[in-house]
Structures are given as structure tokens and as C-alpha cells.
Amino acid sequence: MPEIYTLALVDNRRPAFLPREDAPLLRALNAGELPDGYAPVARLGDPDLLHCVVCRCAGGPGGCFLLEDGSGPLMAVVAESNLAYTLGLGRFGRLVSDARYAADIFENGGDDDEL
């Protein structure tokens, strides 16, 4: 079952992931659909490993990040402000690229001890 969080700024400076109750968003995730009120703008990462669908809020600031792996949805993170949205872009962009980089090293690593 996917988890849902709000990306918030604690004391207006530290990003934090706070648990969120959002039944319509959870229904959309479980149905494999995009949530109402959000428009997709990018897909980051590798769909077979870990990827993130980036969506903007259709009528205001912020957006959401839908993280999935080859098995389905893992979590949704809602950013309610443009600042939280841009912080989320940086965090999730790096997360999925680091996952792909690590998988490439593992998949392409030889059996010899070359350095």
C-alpha cells in the first residue's frame, strides 16, 4: 500500500516529510491514475528500477511527486508551496539518479578486483 506525505518546511527552513491523510490521492495511486487537480510535467528515473512522476498543481502553487518501482506505487509526496516543490524536485531527482547509478555499477561490475 502506498504511503502519502506532505513535504513541509519546519521552522521555514528544514524540509520534513509529514504523514498525510488523503483518501482521493490514495485511491488514484491504487488505481494507477494521476490524482485530480495535478498535471504531469516530467518523469524522472528508470521505470523498472525507481522513477518519479512529477506533477504541478493545476490551479495553484506546488505539486506532487509519485514514486514507483517495477512493482507499482511506493509513495506520493505533496508539496503545497512552490518552495517545497522545487526542494522536492532536487531531492527526488537526485534520489532516482543515485539509484540508477548504483544499479549500473552493480550490473556492470566485473568479477575482478579492478580499481
Image: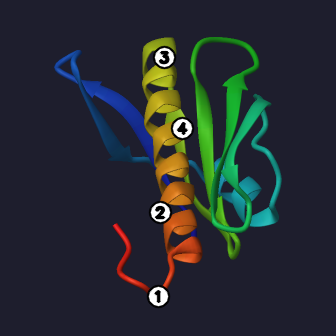
**Does residue 21 appear anywhere in the picture?**
no
Q: On the image, numbered disc 1 is attached to which residue? A: 111
Question: Mark 3 or 1, which is nearer the eye?
Answer: 1
Q: Position of residue 26 (x, y in %)?
A: 64, 57
Residue at coordinates 69% horizontally, 24% vertically from top-left? 56
The circle drawn on residue 93 is 4
Three-letter residue code for mark 4: Gly
Q: Secondary structure at mark 2?
A: helix
- Chain-order first, disc 3 or disc 1: 3
Taking the image as shown, residue 69 lies to the left or right of residue 11, namely right
The CA span between labels 2 and 3 is: 31 Å
The CA span between labels 3 and 1 is: 48 Å
**Closer-to-camera residue (69/26):** 69
Q: Residues within 10 Å of mark 4 (few under 14, many from 20)?
A: some
Three-letter residue code for mark 1: Asp
Quadrant of the image for the C terminus?
bottom left
Question: Mark 1 or 4, which is nearer the eye?
Answer: 1
Question: Mark 2 or 3, which is nearer the eye?
Answer: 2
Q: On the image, numbered disc 3 is attached to which residue? A: 81
For residue 31, above or below residue 84: below
Considering every residue shown, the one lying at the far bottom of the view is 111
Three-letter residue code for mark 3: Ser
Q: Position of residue 42 (x, y in %)?
A: 75, 33
The CA span between labels 3 and 4 is: 18 Å
- Chain-order first, disc 1 or disc 2: 2
- Chain-order first, disc 2 or disc 3: 3
Residue at coordinates 40% horizontally, 34% vertically from top-left? 7
Q: Secondary structure at mark 3?
A: loop
The circle drawn on residue 102 is 2
